[in-house]
Image (cartoon, helix red, strand yellow):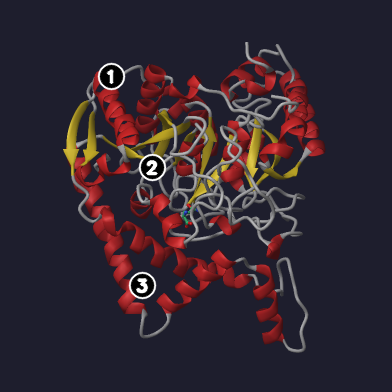
Amino acid sequence: MDALHERSAAQVARAVNAREVSAREVTDAVLAHVDGIDAHVGAYLTTLHDLARAQADRIDERIRQGETLPLAGVPVAVKDNMCLEGTRTTCASKILEHWVSPYTATAVQRILDAGGIPIGKANLDEFAMGSSCENSALGVTRNPYDLTRVPGGSTGGPAAAVGAYEAAIGLGSDTGGSIREPGAFCNLVGFKPTYGRISRYGLIAFASSLDQIGPLTRTVQDAALAYDVMAGKDPMDATSVSPPPEEPAAGALRADLRGLRVGIVKEFATQALGDDIDAVYRQAYRDLEALGAEIVEVSLPTADYGLATYYLIAPAECSSNLSRFDGVRYGLRVDADDVTQMYERTRAAGFGPEVKRRILIGTYALSSGYYDAYYVRAQKARTLIANDFKRAFAACDLIACPAASQPAFTFNAKSDPYSMYMMDYYTIPMSLAGLPALSVPCGWVTPPGGATPMPMGLQLCAPIFAESLLLGAAHAYEQATKHAEKRKPVFPEGARA
Ligand code: GLN
């Protein structure tokens, strides 16, 4: 059996429920590992030693009382844009650097009620805007498979934490790819459920029509476990939906793909991504077929407009959502002679360059005179993209495509905003359509000039509310290929691993 901190969520919960090990022992093992290596990885902005131990003792008491808990003793990394009462929630921004959550997000609360242990609040791109975690104003997070490379973003901290065994479940948010891309970069399963499936109450809003919470885990089974706990209607989030009557995802894991049609997207041909990467995806599609799936070609003719559409809608919503950070109520205030100057100075000092760029783009797109030309047209394009998916799903049950066009890159490799935005080319269309999608490890590629092979992710996408089908199929693929197990993270000499 693996060392305590290396166990999956399912393994931990089983052992703690069976009283083979206590939640406290697991928690102490994970915290000792975090103390040994997080100086190198930088996954956490805040570690919660006392809170974690107190929660572990509470869980052990509940187990002693005879309860069985789906996540008993499971160590969890929470992206630092989700509230956890009494802890800092910074959004990796100077403007919220010292802000303490007055309440707990519904998704986080459900994880805690199910027995999860909050190990820490993990790093992200400032306000979840970015694809590498380099936009964090508060810390550097490194990829556990090569510390000279980024973990992906914006959920880079939780991805690095789970990849480095500093947690078994990472809670992330995905607006345009922020769970799936770091999942791919860190050899994980990164799962974004259907829009509305998990309450966003207590998730600090970036783009409210796109934001969705989901798990990052080392196995599909763990993703299903975390999802089953978090999903469902919440009276505090009007966009949350009740699950239709279906089996829990954890009970729908399949052994093969017989009877399923998997659509390969004509417009997402992988030849242009280079021979190595092309070979990885061709093999992945062959493996799906070998598992019994019927491979069909589908077309998403307007998906190519996804990026342009997203970079109008997301900034427009962000410019509105972030207007609340003005020095009056939340976080940083830079004093001035009058209130307008106070707003200006606070926002100039508190927001980083990418956040400012988004606010400017969004404000412009929403301004009278440009509203119809940009914002309204983007909404129309969004509908066309969603319609493309509807048509495609008439011919297939699942869609398979890359999660990202390349493996994790080195720091400062994407120096202009556009090349960073391109990292979400394959994930944004699903976000605009509100569809459930995940990334699952599908092979290893040595990047040009790189010293070690880095993981790649296969993206699978299902129709709205078909999470159980999606996770079930991903499990069959994962178990047949076992790509994630081929390499372990690397840590410097002397660091505990
Ligand atoms: N990388 C995209 C962006 O910067 C997506 C971010 C996200 O999903 N939160 O907006």
Q: The residue under label 1 is which amino acid type? A: Leu
**Residue 324: in sight, yes or no?**
yes
Mark 1 Cα-neighbour bin, 10 Å: few <14, some 14–19, many ≥20: some
Mark 2 Cα-neighbour bin, 10 Å: few <14, some 14–19, many ≥20: many
User: Secondary structure beneath disc 1?
Assistant: loop
Position of 94 relative to 82 (above/below)? below
Task: Classify the position of the C terminus by image quarter.
Answer: top right
Q: The residue under label 2 is which amino acid type? A: Pro
Residue contact between numbered discs 1 and 3, judged by CB atoms under 8 Å: no
What residue is disc 3 on? 375
What residue is disc 2 on? 436
Position of 329 relative to 268 (above/below)? below
Whole-Å distance between the Cαs marked 2 and 1? 22 Å
Residue 445 drawn at (x, y percent) = 42, 32
Which numbered disc flags the more N-terminal residue, 1 or 3? Answer: 1
Q: Nearer the viewer, residue 247 or 471?
A: 471
Tell me, for residue 291, which label it has, or none. Answer: 1
Q: Is label 1's Cβ within 8 Å of ligand 1?
A: no
Residue 351 drawn at (x, y percent) = 63, 68
Q: How many marks?
A: 3
Task: Classify the position of the N terminus by image quarter.
Answer: top right
Mark 3 Cα-neighbour bin, 10 Å: few <14, some 14–19, many ≥20: many
Position of 495 relative to 232 (above/below)? above
**Residue 326: in sight, yes or no?**
no
Q: Is residue 350 left or right of residue 188?
A: right
User: Secondary structure beneath disc 2?
Assistant: loop
User: Secondary structure beneath disc 3?
Assistant: helix
